[in-house]
Image: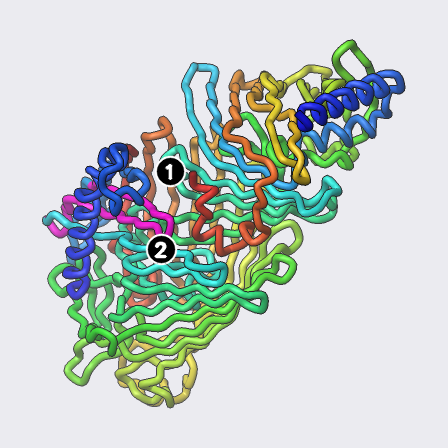
Amino acid sequence: MKRNLLILLGGLLLITGVAMAQNTTPSADEIVRKANHMALYQGADVKGKVSMVITDTQGRVRKRAFNILRKNDDNLNRNQKYYTFFQAPADVRKMVFMVHKHADLEKDDDRWLYMPSLDLVKRIAASDKRTSFVGSDFLYEDISGRSPEDDHHELIETTEDYYVIKNTPRKPESVEFVHYIAHIDKKNFLPMKIEFFKKDGRVYRVIESLQVQAIEVEENGQPSTYPTVTVSMARDLESGSTTKMTYSNINYNIGIGDDIFSERYLRRPPRDAMR
Amino acid sequence: MKPNKLFSFVGFLAGWILLITMAPVVSAAEEGKNPFLEQFAPIEMHGFLELRAGVRTQDDPDAKDISVMEARCQAEFFTYTDWAEFKYKGDVWGDGITEQAEYDTREGWIFSRPSNLVDFKVGRQILTWGTGDLVFLNDLFPKDWQSYFIGRDSEYLKAPSDAAKISLFNEIANIDLVYTPQFDPDRYITGEYISYWDAGTANHAGQDDIIHADTPDRWFEDDELAVRLYRNISNYELALYGYWGFWKQPSGQTVSATPIFPELNVYGASIRGQVAGGIGNLELAYYDSIEDSGGGDPLIDNSEMRYVVGYTRDLAMDLNASLQYYVEQLLDYRAYEDSLSGIPKRDEFRHVITLHLTQLLLNQTLELSLSGYYSPSDKDAYLRPKISYDLTDSIILETGANIFIGEEDYTFFGQFENNTNVYAAVRYSL
């Protein structure tokens, strides 16, 4: 009963919060800051299963499956650690890809790849984040996030459901787009659609969130929910290739230790990551 | 690899026993009948079938025209309980070179993580450490150069060890201890698959002159110990290494010219981390050939210093390059020169430059790669161009070559000139 009251109270607070937010439209930077948090930093840590279905123009289908562990270094929405354990296809099965993500623009991420058939821990140069992730239409930067500091943000439209933000890169020479436009859900601040534009004004790449689920979590001992994108689609309009990414078995705030993101667990994955 | 045969067979048997006993586990566990078997997770099974064929591009009087010809099946089984993990991985293949059915246990181990401070892994396992890219200094775990040179998949460059690995973790530095109770030599060039230069007869030799070395094989006496201390400081990986065992390839001979594995201790260090948008590595090792401490014994290889410095980075989207400079320095060179009697002598320094280029195309389904080793001091080179294409998620097509070039017959890569080969393979994964 008490819990129900709390939820009701929480709900009311949320509604009034949202109502207030609607009254005073936040700044573009504030929207992007929140969207960045919602897309990548909810909870102290999270574990989930990812499956990708890549379909090319000729209808050929390739599948990828991996488990992913993520942990925030702090509450500042900056540095994070990622641990990815591959399950399919066969040639990458049981490989582990680990990233220590550094939000500092001057500092490259640290990346490792473990190849079990050779027992080899490989250090990977992290120079180009705008490279396809495992051959899909998602880029590394789509998975681990593009830092808000990389772009100028401009609120170009507020519709009934979305804030529409135009993002222009601070270092245009480092990326293949001239700008991208993000539709951010006004209620939960999740990015629902991102369109990337080429110089001639053409959209050539689209990422859409197709499904959002409220994942039940425990936060500081209290039940709560984190809205989370569980199905998303990346489309490369130039090649005609699409990738549907499904995120399942999501568990937030499970207390992943910092040591998981070390050579010990790179060479021999934690049980959590394998299942 | 004679002494390993028995071990292979035991591993093979253990694997199948595991499989056979576990197969009912899944059903038994469902019914909740057998409390012992119930603790095992359902067995994960994977594997592949592969056909691989290659030919020498020139006539080699000491070897067959075919360089590789095999139909291979690899099977892998994995399960775990609350307290341990179990893995078996083995290959069977029909081998056109040996004209026999061959079998090799790649892995057969138990792993356990009994506390926050300790991991251990016991059994047949693949072991690798060190920073070199296909150049090994402090990694004295067995390599399979024959497989590498005839163009088998790169996973076969590493031969398995029958060993116990204990890893200790703490704040100051982590420690790996690997104890191999019976010496595991490299699968070195014996003449069986690859012909070589026989310094004794000053001639090329091959399948009719297979090297029969006297391999140390007494359990718990002819053993090996390898140790690594390592820690990260701001993601710069620092490591110290030690090894007490034997030269991994015949590096000496008896008075009656039987190749032997003299005792060897190795001490070294390495560092690896980010440098200017890429990854830099530096490693060195002192090879102490303790049976020839003064360097004056012509029958035993001298001690050496080995150094490598390397750098890898992306040059463009999905194009990676790695460059290394590797040096072997023969110690006590004067004593070595004095002890010589007519054999083409080694230089004091052997310099090798390695370059690896990898380009991914077509949504990373097509991989073009080139590995090159070039020695300006030996005036020889080894090139490994390769193309592999993922036709589907389970079918991989591959073609490549192993090209040996050398001015002299007796240098490291030059001696293999007649073995230059091209190959193609298709692999179907299950």
Are marks 1 and 2 in one subunit? no
Question: Can residue A199 be seen by looking at this rendering?
Answer: no
Q: Give the vertical position of A91 relative to A187 (above or below).
A: below
Q: Quadrant of the C terminus of chain A?
A: top left
* Residue at screen point 54% across, 31% down: A250
Label 2 environment density (alpha carbons within 10 Å; few <14, some 14–19, many ≥20): many
- What kind of residue is marked 1? Asp
* Residue at screen point 50% across, 69% down: B229
Chain letter of the residue beneath label 2 in the structure image: B
Question: Can residue B197 be seen by looking at this rendering?
Answer: yes
Q: Give the vertical position of B215 relative to B136 (above or below).
A: below
Between the C-alphas of marks 1 and 2, the distance is: 23 Å
Position of A179 with respect to B76 (left or right) is: right
In the image, residue A43 lies at what x, y percent? 65, 37
Residue ID for mark 2: B111
Magenta region: B72-99
Q: What secondary structure characterizes most of the magenta part? A: strand
In the image, residue A9 lies at what x, y percent? 75, 24
Q: Is residue A253 magenta?
A: no
In the image, residue B304 lies at what x, y percent? 42, 77
Residue ID for mark 1: A91
**Circle number at residue A156:** none
The foreground one among A179 and A155 is A155
Position of A147 with respect to A266 (left or right) is: right
Chain letter of the residue beneath label 1 in the structure image: A
The foreground one among A170 and B351 is A170
